[in-house]
Amino acid sequence: MAANKNKADKTKNTASGRKKTSSKTSSKGAKTASRTKASAVPKRSSGLSPRVRAILYAAVAAVFVCIIFIKGSNVWTMIRSFFFGFLGFGIFLVPVTLFYLCVMTEKEKQVARYKLKLFLCVIIILFIGALIYAGSGAKYSDMNFFACLGNLFKDASDTSRYMTFNCGIIGGLLGYPLVVLFGSTAALFTSFVVTAALILIVANISIKDMTAAASRTAVHIREAGEERARVRRERREENRERKLAERGDIDIALEGENRKSSGSFIDIPLDDKKTKVKEAKSAVNGIDTDIADSKEENAADKDLSQDLINIINRASKPMGKSADNTVSAIAEDISNEKSAPKAEQTEVKPDAETENIVKKALLKSKKDNSEEAGDEIAEQLDRAVRSDNSQKEEKKYQFPPIQLLKPKLNSDDSDAMEEMQNNAKKLIDTLTSFGVKAKIVNICRGPSVTRYELQPAPGVKISKITNLSDDIALSLAANGVRIEAPIPGKAAVGIEVPNKVVSMVTMRELIDSDKFKNSKSKLTTVLGKDISGEIVVTDLAKMPHLLIAGTTGSGKSVCVNSILMSILYKATPDEVKLLLIDPKMVEFSKYKGIPHLLIPVVSDAKKAAGALAWAVNEMLQRYKIFSEYDCKDIDSYNSLIEKNMNYMEKNPPVVNEEGEEVQPVLEVNGLPVAKEKMSRVVIAIDELADLMMAAPSEVEDSICRLAQMARAAGMHLILATQRPTVNVITGLIKANVPSRISLKVSSNTDSRTILDTGGGEKLIGRGDMLFSPVGAPKPIRVQGCYASDEEIEGVTHYIKKAYSAQYNSEIEEKIKRIAAEEIAQGKKSSDSDSASDEGLDVDSKMEEAIKCVIEAGQASTSLLQRRLKVGYARAGRMIDDMEQMGVVGPHQGSKPRDVLMTYNEWLERRNALENRAD
């Protein structure tokens, strides 16, 4: 037993020893781990962080900018003199260098690179100073080093000028040794080479990059020259063919009969138009066959709903057999999707209803295109007959042929089906994820935008959908979507999504449309196609004035050109006259010399104000004529002229008592009716903002009077501007110009300035516009048509070749006289204003009172009483004097007067008075 106890005690002692050893080991391990963790913690850097350094660089750069451009006094002048004397011209490089280092400090992760660039920037400033020293003649190089530096400091420390080209001390530090050792020319060359090399190193630009950029520029120049040469060759070819066509050298085989004539002749077929007509007819027959085949396939497919197929037909327009192949492929995809397992959730698979809607959108225009092709062939034949008959008649004004405009290219809509399917599926999924239940009832595919018409479930507010515009754009990966809620005339919400492939709307397809041809108005204009693909044609006479606004590159000038081109294709020079005002001198230059112009294109701002003043006088003169003949507008007056012409045809001339033949005419109120109709006048201004800056009061007054009264007189305004601010488009102009077009604008504020509603900032540009005609409840989204410079030049060249311009010299003289009178009147009024200011018995506190009302933003007698501590009578006299000076506006009853002078204008006036007193 004792032995067993001893063994147990030894076992316990051994176990306890192990425990002590393990505890010691664990404690040592913990201490080692703690030391390891402590050593692993990085030490804080003693230097400044990159962000702090960048802020310091920016602050120092701002201080140097203030030193350069702000003239102070006392200590500030001493500081400016010191830095100008020390750095010279290099003081202008210091802020640039510091701003560059501010940017590079954030980018460079390695401190060594940053320090290297800082060192190189300092060296660049030194070598630029040396370059200026050597280039300026190396002044004081015959003196010793320190005397040279002293004189350079004295020359550069003159702070009376903002710009100084003295090198300062920093230029002499390196420039003086270089000039002494190398000479002026060698020092100049060395400084230039080293400076250029250091700039390339700091900017990280290699010789290879410079060579590549130069080669690309040379290639662009060569390609531009080749393109211009090709355009000139094509233009010469077109002119030659046009001349041959006018002489009747090209014979069109209408019925395939061979013309026979006596005698020998040589018949050279210049254009085989008979073969082209046959090929076109066969193409039309092929299209009809394809349509019939596609209809049979659609009828055989029982899985597709007939109602949804009808919806899809309105969204897209493929040509020929591609539509049939597309429909059959989609039908196979739908059947495959029905049998496919539901586990494949990564792919976007629309439901059957959405597929049918998209199919209907893609099957629409097979019939339309076939009919258009047949109509185009028939129209060409009719046009050939008309041109053949017109040669036999007397020469009249002939409208430009439609062949001068480029035809529409067949677009490939093979990817449109997949795009609409994916967008429809993503759209429904996005709305569902936000708890909005809706279904797609229609898809309208336009040239640049597709509208998905949604019908919300009962109980869903429209605001829930409109608030998700950004989320929908994110889901569809679109630049932006526009939501029209609700669509006018429909119980649906429209979500407009930009197309990935934009189809160009050509001018030819709009001018050649039935809507344009059948319109009776001579001011019918084409704009483009709406979101459903329908042609948008409007009447300028019903607008009656149009305001167009949009940023640069949005299609503003193209829109104005399309309106003017429409007038050239619709009206003769006797029916419509144009008055074009182009301050930029480049937009309307193509229309110079056409017979529709009243006067040459106006480019001078003062002359433009005179032209608008002439238009006002012409409007008043027309109203006077209307009142004499009891006519209310130009249409009734022209109908009276037409009645008079019919009366003259029926009644031959008679011999009066004196033996002279007299043509009997109608008389109204004892006045004989005129024999010539009154033409309409369209006044187009390309850049309204420039005119408003040059002559704001004259231009605004003339535009407002024309906009208010010129409709019945047959005068219409087209105002275009790229700066839609309230200073340009004033409240009076907006109130009198009801029809407006907004292209792409930069902000919601600009859109509201034009349309009184938002949406213009969400357009995609390049002719995408919101058209708000007079009386429309909501703007219409339209993709504007495109007319290239070649097409415009071709049309105007055709018109100018046949008919020369006949400018009205009387109107030109009137405009020049009115412009001269306005300029003289403006000078006279300014002189009288200054004289009246001098002649006033000015109060001693007048300047203080003017400053008080300018700072307050309004003027009142009680304000001056409180601020200046004067009586009521004195404050009232000062208010009246300020009204005569033009500082404040007229009396407005109990309201405070408006302040017309800004703070800067008051400072200029005060300085002028002080200089005059001196």
Image: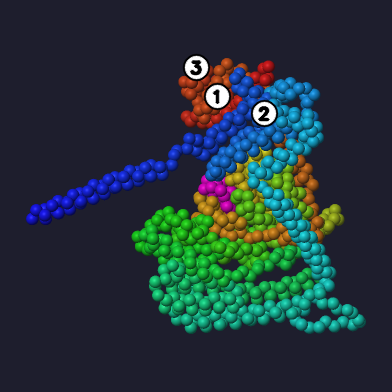
Name the disc covering residue 851, or none.
Answer: 1
Q: Secondary structure at mark 2?
A: helix
- Residue at the outermost front position: 3
Q: Indicate whether residue 189 is drawn in magenta.
A: no
Residue type, label 2: Leu
Crowd rating for badge 2 (residues with CA inside 10 Å; few <14, some 14–19, many 20+): many
Per the image, the residue denoted by label 2 is: 87
Q: Which residues are magenta?
A: 733-752
Identify the amino acid type marked 1.
Answer: Lys
- Residue 442 or 163: which is nearer the viewer? 163
Q: Is residue 685 above or below residue 639?
A: above
Q: Position of residue 883 (x, y in %)?
A: 58, 26
Residue where numbered disc 3 is placed: 870
Residue 78: image location, x then y, percent: 63, 21
Q: Is 738 included in the stretch rendered in magenta?
A: yes
Which residue sits at x=46%, y=66%?
Answer: 424
Asked where in the image residue 151 lies, by quadrant, the reply is top right
Please name the residue shown 71% across and 39% down the image.
Answer: 195
- The numbered disc on residue 461 is none
30 on left or right of 397: left
Image marks 3 and 1: residues in contact by CB distance under 8 Å: no
Q: Residue 895 or 328: which is nearer the viewer?
A: 328
Residue closest to the eye, 819 or 335? 335
